[in-house]
Image (tube, grey):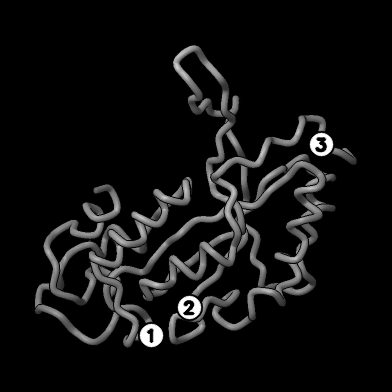
Amino acid sequence: MTNYAAPRRPVSRRAKSLGAAVSAALGACGALALAGNATAGEERRRDTGAGTEAAAAPGTTFAPYVDTSLQPSYDLVKRAEETGVREFNLAFITSGGGCTPKWGGTQELGENAVARQIDALRAKGGDVRVSVTPMIGVNDVIVEVFRPDDAAEVKKFADEQGMGWLSMWSATRDKACPGGPKDQADPTCSSIEQGADDFAKAFTG
């Protein structure tokens, strides 16, 4: 298929710029992974007698992840035209050190060949999604520690921006380590002092 048959969805308050999302979300530091440029789960809206309410688009949306670090760069528009896939998750924006957001932790935001295709994809009626996934507790870069207070700050930002998806790495780490806090990341606990499920509570509070 050479063009999208469905009309392009109107840009709502949920469509936010990558720069704003990254700078605000990374303000809490920690290792954050952001995919793409527009919010996940963008909804169609309809007017009713009771006012404007959200209405989910019919069907289930398929939005595959795209590894933006590979060469040759993935062609979003070509693949969208050939497959009919309209939305993609771009992976990943992470901390490049010192809470500086970079593609894959190494590439400046404006230099990624896949991300530079976003406008062309949107012109065809497609879009990309953004998700925020902090690594809770002590991160792989041990000077970056993401605490429950940081989770609450990210949740507040996501609510204000109308973002459709928050996650964390990982639910199995959302507890204190048996031996107490330590200065290295652990796959089974957060390595910080916390109560059980403190991060889950902060993200859903």
Indicate the position of residue 61 as horizontal and vertical percent values.
60, 37
Name the residue furthest top: 49
Indicate the position of residue 145 as horizontal and vertical percent values.
29, 78
Which one is in front, 21 or 134? Answer: 21
For the residues labelled 1 and 2, the Cα–Cα distance comes to: 9 Å
* SS under mark 3: loop
- Is the C-beta separation of discs 1 and 2 under 8 Å? yes
Which one is in front, 161 or 118? Answer: 161
* SS under mark 1: loop
Front label number (1 vs 2): 2
The residue positioned 51% from the left and 67% from the top of the image is 22
106 on left or right of 189: right
**Which corner quadrant of the image does residue 156 belong to?**
bottom left
The residue positioned 22% from the left and 69% from the top of the image is 189
According to the picture, the residue beneath numbered tag 3 turns out to be 4
Q: Amino acid at mark 2?
A: Ser
